[in-house]
Image (cartoon, grey):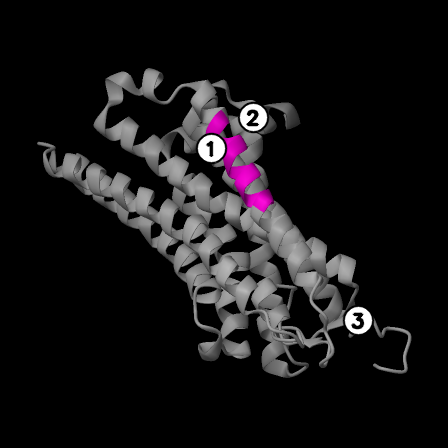
Amino acid sequence: MENGNHTSYFILLGLFNHTGAHYFLFVMMLTIVFISLLVNALMILLIHQDHRLHTPMYFLLSQLSLMDMMLVFTIVPKMAADYLTSNKFISPAGCGLQIFLFLTLAGGECFLLAAMSYDRYVAVCHPLRYPVLMNWPLCMRMILGSWFLGAADGIMQAVVTLNFPFCKSREIDHFFCEAPTLLRLACTDTSVFEYAMYICCVLMLLIPISLILTSYSLILLAVLHMRSTEARKKAFTTCSSHLAVVGLFYGATTFIYMRPKSYRSANHDKIVSTFYTIFTPALNPLIYSMRNSDVKGALTKCISSLSYLKS
């Protein structure tokens, strides 16, 4: 490395080794990624095409699908190319771009999930006032705010992280550039920045999850007062599935970004990172959208239209 042409480059060690078991896991991962991209793209298409889905709730869902697709494209193509070609070099600019895009999308998703929980709270607890409490201007402010806060965190962490001197090995024991992993290679004191990053994580993670838990707690209280057992069961099932996906996403990101440096392990970080970069983007549309009767209706209508055109 020191005498080669890639002195200023980093090396991503990746997630998989070239063994039979890891080849199988790699193919499984690509299958999940393909399904994730397909389902999220389908969700965006259905919401765009069907006028019945032109509501704040589904517009928020379309933004979630867009963020998930972009998150997958930010991480997986480079990781797959590195594994297949064994060319694991990444430039500082490429590394900074990955950090920026990843944090923009992951941070934006944190706030978007909080906005979606508020939308569900209003729909369940104040259905008659829904058009007033969840109007289009508020919906647009929530979406733009989510993108802006994610981008602000992303550009701050990318710029500061890459300004540290890296005089140790430039091997990044990860499958993409992530700020906490990159800081391990710095040969200067990073404690001040790590403390600032910890404060950012409190704002980006704990505040939205508090809003989400508050919203769903109020929803569950309202559900308990429902007279219909069937409606109560359906609401409980929906809320529990939503909270499971939220818990998976927030739990994994909290584990990576809010753990003390002394407790960090590269292998653990890589495994946990797959949850919010690969698995959650595949689960989100299945949990939030595909089980919805309106979405099923839009899908059926779309399939019927295609069948009619073919005939």
Mark 2 residue element? helix
Label 3 sits on what residue type? Thr
Q: Say whether residue 24 is magenta.
A: no
**Alpha-carbon distance for marks 3 and 2?**
38 Å
Q: Is residue 45 above or below residue 1?
A: above
| Quarter of the image where the N terminus is located | bottom right
**Alpha-carbon distance for marks 1 and 2?**
12 Å
Residue 167: x and y in percent read 74, 78
Q: Is residue 208 above or below residue 303?
A: below
Q: Is residue 20 above or below residue 163?
A: below
Q: Residue at x 59, y 56 (%)?
A: 33
If you read the primary sequence from the N terminus, does the residue marked by circle 1 or circle 2 appear first?
Answer: 2
Q: Residue at x 79, y 63 (%)?
A: 91
Frontmost of labels 1 and 2 is 1
Residue 191 falls in which quadrant of the image?
bottom right
Residue 39: x and y in percent read 54, 44
**Alpha-carbon distance for marks 3 and 1?**
38 Å
Q: Which residue is mark 3?
A: 85
The mark found on residue 60 in the picture is: 1
* Mark 3, other Cα within 10 Å: few <14 / some 14–19 / many ≥20: few
